[in-house]
């Protein structure tokens, strides 16, 4: 079992949002399914399961999260760029002033 203090950590993973975006993109169509009927019975109409139903029932993902996932990935990108720039700036300042 996953400890309670660790459960929220998946929100900090950029892979979560990228995978959800790919799943939303993949299931952007209607899927036919077959009925479970005894032999000898014929049902001519296919059942349809929407992409919303598939993603929410199986993965707890909403189609409306597509743009939110993209926005979060963009925010991750900007955050890491700012961190990288800050670290480069700090190390450059230390090297200019002779501190190692």
Image: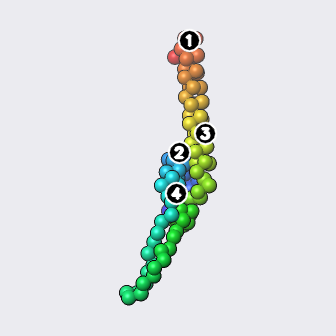
Residue 100 point in image, percent of width and height:
52, 16
Nearer to the camera, 45 or 25 = 45
Residue 41 point in image, percent of width and height:
41, 87
Question: How packed is label 2: few (under 14 Cα within 10 Å), some, or many (20 or more)?
Answer: some
- Residue drawn at (53%, 62%), measured in percent from left and top? 51
Of the residues under marks 3 and 4, which one precedes in the sequence? 4
The residue positioned farthest toward the front in the image shown? 44
Give the mark toward the camera: 2 or 1.
2
Q: CA distance from mark 1 to mark 3?
A: 31 Å
Residue that mark 2 sits on:
14
Question: How packed is label 4: few (under 14 Cα within 10 Å), some, or many (20 or more)?
Answer: few
Q: Is residue 11 above or below residue 44?
A: above
Q: Quadrant of residue 34?
A: bottom left
Residue 62 point in image, percent of width and height:
59, 58
Q: Is residue 79 left or right of residue 34?
A: right
Give the mark toward the camera: 3 or 4.
4
Secondary structure category for the residue under label 2:
helix
Q: Quadrant of residue 79?
A: top right
- Residue drawn at (53%, 55%), measured in percent from left and top? 24
Q: CA distance from mark 2 to mark 4?
A: 22 Å
Q: Is residue 8 left or right of residue 38?
A: right
Of the residues under marks 1 and 3, which one precedes in the sequence? 3
Residue that mark 4 sits on:
28
Q: Which mark is residue 51?
A: none
Question: How packed is label 1: few (under 14 Cα within 10 Å), some, or many (20 or more)?
Answer: few
Q: CA distance from mark 4 to mark 1?
A: 54 Å
- Residue drawn at (58%, 39%), measured in percent from left and top? 74
Question: How packed is label 3: few (under 14 Cα within 10 Å), some, or many (20 or more)?
Answer: few
Q: Which mark is residue 96?
A: 1
Residue that mark 3 sits on:
75
Q: Is residue 14 above or below residue 2?
A: above
């Amino acid at each position: 079992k996953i400890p309670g203090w660790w459960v929220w950590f998946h929100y900090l993973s950029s892979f979560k949002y990228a995978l959800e975006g790919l799943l939303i993109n993949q299931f952007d169509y209607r899927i036919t399914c077959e009925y479970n009927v005894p032999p000898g019975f014929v049902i001519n109409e296919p059942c349809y399961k929407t992409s919303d139903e598939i993603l929410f029932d199986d993965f707890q993902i909403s189609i409306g999260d597509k743009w939110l996932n993209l926005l979060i990935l963009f925010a991750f990108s900007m955050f890491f760029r700012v961190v990288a720039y800050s670290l480069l700036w700090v190390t450059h300042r230390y090297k200019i002033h002779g501190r190692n």
